[in-house]
Amino acid sequence: MTPLEVQQLRDATPGCQSGIVHFNHAGASLPSQATLDAIIDQLQREARDGPMEAGEQGALLLEKARRAAGQLLNAPAASIAFASSGSTAWSMAFQALGPWQPGERILVGRHEWGGNLASMELAVQAGARVEVIPCDETGAACPVALASMIDSNVKLIDLTWLPANGGLINPAQAIGEVARRHGIPYFIDAGQAVGQLPVDVQALHCDVLKAAGRKHLRGPRGTALLYVRPDFLERLNPAQRDVFSAPWTAAGFDLRNDARRFETSEVSFALLAGLGNALQEMNRLGIERVWERVEQTSARIREALCQMPRISLHDLGSARSGLIAFNLAGWDAFELKRSLGLKRINIGANSVAYTPLDMQARGLTSVARISVSPLNTDQEIELLMDALRELRD
C-alpha cells in the first residue's frame, strides 16, 4: 500500500481524526464513515418506513454481506451464516455437533480461546475429554504430534489459528490436512485472522470457521461470521431453531439446507448493513495487500520494542501476526493499558482467562497487547514508543 492509499483510508475513518492513537485492532478496529453511514441509513429507513417494512431492504443488504463474506473466504455464499458474536457462532456449531458420549476426545491447540473451552464443558460433563495437541519447538501446534494422537474416539479437532495473547500463527492448513486425512471434523477459530491475513477455507480443509466483525474487518460490534462446509452441514443439528432456521413445510418444520439453519428471524439489519460495507471495503482493498502492510508495521514495532530495556516480548512460532504481546517490567499489563489510555494511546491487555492453557503453561498472568492495522503509521509508532519510554523511566 502506498502512503497515499494509507492516508485515504485514514481520511475515510473518523477514529483517525480524533487525536487518539489506536493500537487495539485485535480488540475492535475503527470503522469507516461509509460503514457508519450504512448502519445509520438502515436505522433511518426503519424509523421512516417502519421497522418491519424496512426489513425487505435490510434482507437485501444482508444477502449482499453474505456474498461479500463468501468472496473474502473463498466460500459459497450459502455456506455463510451471521451471528451476534464469534463466541455465539462457535458455540452454536459446537453444540450442534453433539450429543457427546463418554470417552470421546476433543483435540485442541494449547492456545485455544477461553470462550471455546468454556463451551466444551458441556461435552466434558457428558464424559468427553479435552486434550492438548503438543507444540513444536517454536511453540506452535504440531501437526506431526496431532497425527500420532488420532484414534477412533477423536470426535473433533479444534484450533485457534491466531491466539489472542500473542503473535503466533498456528499451522492451520497442515492441521486441516491431518483432520481431512482421517475424516475428523475440524473447527477453526479465525477471530484474529479474518481481515488480517488471507483466509481460504478450501485450502484450510476446515468444516467450520468463525470470526468476529468488530476486529480486523472493521465492522460493528454485535456481528460475526460462521462458515460451514456444505458437505458437513447435515452433521450439525442446531438446538436453537425458529421459523427462519427451520421453516414450515408440508411435512412440518424442517431445517434449512444451508448455513442459515444457524440464523434466526430476528437480526439487526442495521449492524449487518455495516458489516456488509466493511466486507466490501476489505474485498476492494485486497486482503493480500492488507496483510503485507500489517507484516511491515508489526515488524517495525517488534524491532523497536526489542531495543527497549525492561520490555519482554512473548512471541511464539516461526511466523508472526500483527498481535504483539509484551510486558514492561514493574508494570501490571492492565495498569499499563490504562496509563497509555490517559495519554490517548489505545492498546489491549489479556488475562489468563483469554487463553488459559497457554498462559498457564508459560507462567504468564497477564500480557499487554499491541495490535496493528493498515491504518497505523510510523508517526503513531513513534508516539507509542515515546509513551512507553516515559512510563518505563
Image: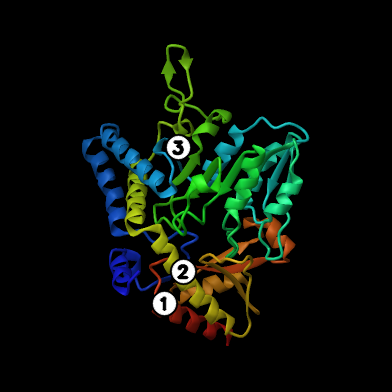
Q: Give coordinates of residue 219: x percent, y percent.
A: 39, 53
- Labels 3 and 1: the sequence-earlier one: 3
- Callout 1–callout 2 Cβ contact below 8 Å: yes
Marks 3 and 1, Cα distance to the nearest angstrom?
A: 39 Å
Q: Is residue 11 left or right of residue 20?
A: left
**Mark 1 is on which residue type?**
Glu
For the residue carrying disc 2, how many other residues have a C-alpha within 10 Å: few (<14), some (14-19), or many (20+)? many
Task: Kindly identify which residue carries mark 1.
Answer: 380
The correct choice, above or below, for 251 with respect to 310 in the image is above
Task: Kindly identify which residue carries mark 2.
Answer: 23
Q: Mark 3, mark 1: which one is toward the viewer?
A: 3
Give whichever of 8, 152 is nearer the camera: 152
Q: Which mark is residue 91?
A: none
- Labels 3 and 2: the sequence-earlier one: 2
Marks 1 and 2, Cα distance to the nearest angstrom?
A: 9 Å
For the residue carrying disc 1, how many other residues have a C-alpha within 10 Å: few (<14), some (14-19), or many (20+)? some
Q: Which quadrant of the rendered structure holds the N terminus?
A: bottom left
At mark 2, the secondary structure is: loop
Q: What residue is at 41 percent from the left and 77 percent from the top? A: 380
Q: Mark 3, mark 2: which one is toward the viewer?
A: 3
Give whichever of 298, 371 is nearer the camera: 298
Q: Is residue 27 left or right of residue 49?
A: right
The residue at the far left in this view is 48
In the rendered image, which quarter is residue 5 located in? bottom left
Task: Kindly identify which residue carries mark 3.
Answer: 79
In the rendered image, which quarter is residue 76 located in? top left
Q: What residue is at 71 percent from the left and 59 percent from the top? A: 135
